[in-house]
Amino acid sequence: MDTASLCTVEKRGAVHVITLTGAGEHRLGPPLLSALRSAVAAVRAGAAAGAGGALVIAGEGKYFSNGFDLAWVRAAPAELHASMGGAFRGLVADLLALPVPTVAAVTGHAAAAGCALALAHDAVVMRASRGFLYMSEVDAGLKIVDFFAELIRQKVPDAVNRRDLVLRGDKMTAADALRRGIVDAAVDGGVDDVVAAAVRAAEALAARGWDGEIVAETRKAIWPELWAKVKDHAADVPRPLPRL
């Protein structure tokens, strides 16, 4: 499969926008995860070359992402199943280690791994009129994996909100998630409006002019348990040369 067709990367001013393309569910199988990690690596390379800026990840259509690609799981040999979880663990590590601020533009439903992907960003902007955050594992009868649980624990620190999201499987609208402090903004309008709002939020962060290495190391420091569970899957990042 041509993974380049699964997502696009464009530059809007100082902001890199990665878009999960098409009207489908944006299921996170190995092809899409590979495409996303390649796109994030390109942003990282630009930042290392001095481009700085910020990153927005968005989805086209009804879904931000509806979670793992279960059709791929059913079709693939059992010995390959772990590769999908490993690739997603790597994507979370790549986002934590990225030397630019990150904003999720949750343009539609974000379920299971799709919800975890949204929460792995520094900030979350969500469409007010459509979509929900939904950790579906309890409803689907699936055991939640360790780094998912740690990501939720770190990004949803309130115990009641965490219980409702994970143990009760509540489908949280943008208004509900904003009230609970899980997302940063609920945006009226369509997909384009949500992406535009996320870009504005990312531009404001990029304008702070932060040192990218400090940004990445700060994420690892404030979420150390999460970083410990994903760091071995991170893409190789060359160490910067010492400043003379």
Image: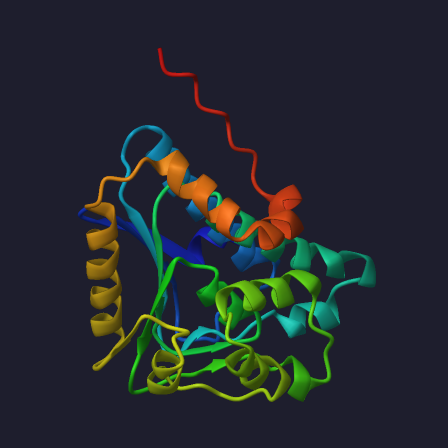
Give residue 115's position: percent from left, percent from top. Answer: 50, 72
In terms of image quadrants, where is residue 148? bottom right
Location of residue 110 with respect to 45 vertically, above or below: below
Q: Is residue 103 visible?
A: yes
Most foreground residue, 134 or 192: 134
Q: Quadrant of residue 143?
A: bottom right
Residue 184 is situated, as x and y percent measured from the top left of the image, at 32, 70
Residue drawn at point x = 48 percent, y = 69 percent: 26
Left or right: 173, with 141 as reference point: left
| Whole-percent x, y for residue 40 in the image | 43, 47
In this rendering, would 15 be left or right of 143?
A: left
Residue positioned 76% across, 57% down in the render: 80
Residue drawn 47% across and 53% down? Answer: 36
Tell me, what colour scheme is on the image? Answer: rainbow
Q: Nearer the viewer, residue 103 or 219?
A: 219
Q: Quadrant of the C terminus?
A: top left
